[in-house]
Image (spheres, grey):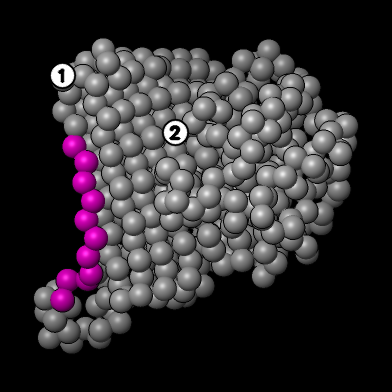
Amino acid sequence: MNALDQYIELYTGNAATVDSNSSGILNDARPQALELLKELGRLPEKGDEGYEKISVNDMFSPDYGVNIARVNIPVDLADVFHCGVTTASTWLGAVANDKFVPTQSLMRNLPEGVTVMSLAKAAEEKPELVGKYYNRVASAGRGGATLALNTLFAQDGVFIHVSCGVKASKAMQIVNLLASPVPMMVVRRVLVVAEEDSEISILLCDHSRGEVGCLVSQVVEVYAGRGSRVNICDMEESSEATSRMSQLFAEQHEGAELKISGMTLLNGTTRNEFYIGHKGDRAVTRLDGMAIGNGRQHIDNFSALEHRGDHGHSNQLFKYVLDGHASGAFEGCITVDNGARFNEAYQSNRNILASCDARMHAKPQLLIYNDDVKCSHGATTGQLDQNALFYMRQRGIPLTEARMMLMQAFMMDVIENVGIEGLSERLRHLVEKRFRGEDMMCAECSARHGV
């Protein structure tokens, strides 16, 4: 079954409804997206280049509803708002299904020069600013049919803007809440613009409740201006019934520093894609990923990082711990363009299979078109250290506890690289609870933030 056909048919029969419930700038991008989808003809299938262990077509095949009429689906924020990292000091906003919900604390406390608001509203109130960046950082040539499908149906999202020279004193936290009584595809869009010499940290948290099968289509665009510093942590704690397709596109200019952490703590089927381009000299990128899977969960990460300027630096580290019948995949590619001199680029994927039935696919790649570089890549997959387990058991530590301690220690360097104040400590706690099989949710958030 070609899943794309049903979405093209849905849009062409309801284009006026989609446009009437959005804004001009978002609507202007739809015709080109539709033409690209018709040209491509299908979504990626398992076995395609870059999709060797996952079928995006299968993810989108179920008969999901799409809320194109923007019907208000009741979401009890007090019931579903159980983000486990809220002891970190942040400005907080929420997205209920696909609707941006600014909290009282966010509206009261944002400093001058930092804007966080509905993307559709920003497109109406700040058309020149949003029009300059929306759907510009994301490249259809890289994101393909999945990006085009998101662009076709995106009616709102989150707009985060930091003015020149402004350094945000706290992290911005966006909690995505998915709770639907019927199967639904939620289309989310996040646009981050960090102007010259600005600084911002952003925490994106995905949570879903219930056993209804739902699909999340998310596209994040990040523009990092000259000398800016942007730190993004994207964390998923969803249900096993949830499928998630997330694509992050970033453009870095001269001297820009970008740190991205992708954390999959709990999920059903997940595909994360990271497309990062150095457009200026001396750009620096740190990209980390952490995935914990058991049962029959699948976590798929793909990265494509391109060095176009001189004296750039990038470092990637992705780690997986897979138990039960869980499966994982990592495919990454570093490209150094011809003429991009004196770049350093490193990529590493390390994995632990904690059971005989867990499976991991790894494919790191380098495409180097310049001799004046320092680049390396590698991948390792193994089991828990039996000597370490024996040593710990000899000292009275139960096997289950010893396994948990080794798996947690394996993840520590990824956790410590997050760089958002207070978040590393909370992540250590959540990872420990995840390995113990305990409930990771907490109920303090709604009262703390006045949602």
**Residue linked to disc 2:** 275
Q: Is residue 119 visible?
A: no
Rendered image: mark on residue 70? none
Dot 1: within a 10 Å radius of its alpha carbon, few (fewer than 14), some, or many (20 or more) residues? some
Side of 66 relative to 329 (left or right): right
Which one is nearer the viewer's eye here, 328 or 264? 328
Magenta-drawn segment: 376-386
SS at circle 1: loop
**Residue linked to disc 1:** 372
Q: Earlier in the sequence, mark 1 or mark 2?
A: 2
Dot 2: within a 10 Å radius of its alpha carbon, few (fewer than 14), some, or many (20 or more) residues? many
Residue 209 drawn in magenta: no
Residue at image location 58% in from the left, 65% down from the top: 239
Q: CA distance from mark 1 to mark 2?
A: 23 Å
Residue 366 in the image: state x and y as whole percent. 26, 34
Looking at numbered disc 2 in the image, what kind of residue is underneath it? Tyr
Residue at image location 61% in from the left, 61% down from the top: 242
